[in-house]
Amino acid sequence: MSDQSLTRRKFIGLGLGATAGVVGAGLVHQAVQAQGPYDNPHAAHTNQYSSEMLVGKVDHDRNGFDPMQMLVDWDYGKVSTLPNGQTLREYEFSAGEHDIEIAPGIFFPAWSYNGRVPGPTIRCTEGDRIRVKFANFGTHPHTIHFHGFHPAEMDGVPGVGAGEIAPGQSVTYEFDAEPFGCHLYHCHATPLKRHIHKGMYGAFIIDPKVGRPPAREFMMMMNAFDTNFDAANEVYAVNTVGHEFMRRPIPAKVGELIRIYLINIIEFDLINSFHLHANFFDYYDTGTSLQPTLRMVDTIMQAQGQRGILEFKFRWPGQFMFHAHVSEFAELGWMGFFNAVEPEKFDEALKLAEVTDDWDRKATNGSTAPGTV
Ligand SMILES: [Cu+2]
């Protein structure tokens, strides 16, 4: 174990000491008598026998966002049609600052878009006109830098076009959405790594005009937080809250196509990864191709800013783990479960994940491509 990882664990341990008895937070070995799913039919519906995970619950209402909802909450903007027939999607973004709970009892002073980390998931079809009005209500200059084709003055970097947007100022970014793929946006103000790791990023999904095959779709932003500002991360997650999908396994149906829009935004660590248990997936690098760029892999590695699309099916019902295959990240929050069930058990799986039919509808009906909705 490296000195750095010892430091991280020490921090989490301190977090536990400071809050134990109040919220019971921290990374601890649970003293639960494990019973395998074969011994206990009910155990298949819970991960409480997991030996190493963050204990307790994050208050999503206080945060103002829920990682489980973020998997499926595509933001289509305010939609209208331009005189030339092009679809216009208008968005209002604001920058602000507030504390968010990233693991039970552990808070992080975030900078965010629209009060959430990650920011809204912009979803559109290639060729749509995107118009984003951005107002800075924070105390630092910010920008929005989109990945994709666009003119230089729409690039959202210091010194070009509107450049950095000062507190109290606003700007409108406008461009056509291309190419199709799994993209992202993030603040590009300096110092860049500070603005990114504070939480100023989000997914930018452009559907191909021809659409993709029907699937259950999820957006997963692999992120991490440097809670003590030592230029190393203490908590790792998908969609901000460590181990949330251990406590609430993600519902899926046996045999259906699952599609994940996966993005890595972590600072300080050179790579991140996604490993799926008991399964293999096809991978579309950057999502800019309709043909897989990798077939039948079970682990994919991404550097910061890299992203891609995963597609797979579950052959059998059961709880299937997914996590970073950097074991330390997994232990510090980046680990979860899918709960694959037969269709007749799906309502039960939704309940366990604390979501409703509406979540299911968004997961299976997200595409903006004509003819797919
Ligand atoms: Cu910023």
Image (tube, grey):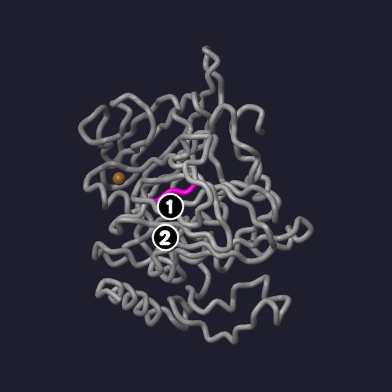
Cα separation, mark 2 vs mark 1, equals 8 Å
Instruction: Please state if 268 lies on the left or on the right of 205 as rendered.
Output: left
What secondary structure is found at the residue carrying circle 2?
strand
Observer-nearest of 182 and 158: 182
- Amino acid carrying mark 2 in the image: Ile
Confirm or deny contact between disc 2 and disc 1 (CB under 8 A).
yes
Q: Which residue is mark 1?
A: 117
Observer-nearest of 54 and 3: 3
Instruction: Please state if 254 lies on the left or on the right of 292 as rendered.
Output: right
Look at 59% across and 50% down and name the residue there: 312
Q: What number is the disc on residue 100?
A: 2
Look at 52% across and 47% down and name the residue there: 295
| Dominant SS in magenta | strand
Instruction: Mark 1 and ligand 1: say if the CB distance to the nearest ligand atom is below 8 Å.
Output: no
Answer whether residue 214 is visible to the viewer in this image.
Answer: yes
- Amino acid carrying mark 1 in the image: Val
The vertical placement of 88 against 99, above or below, is: above
Highlighted magenta segment, given as a residue range = 260-264
The vertical placement of 136 against 332, above or below, is: above
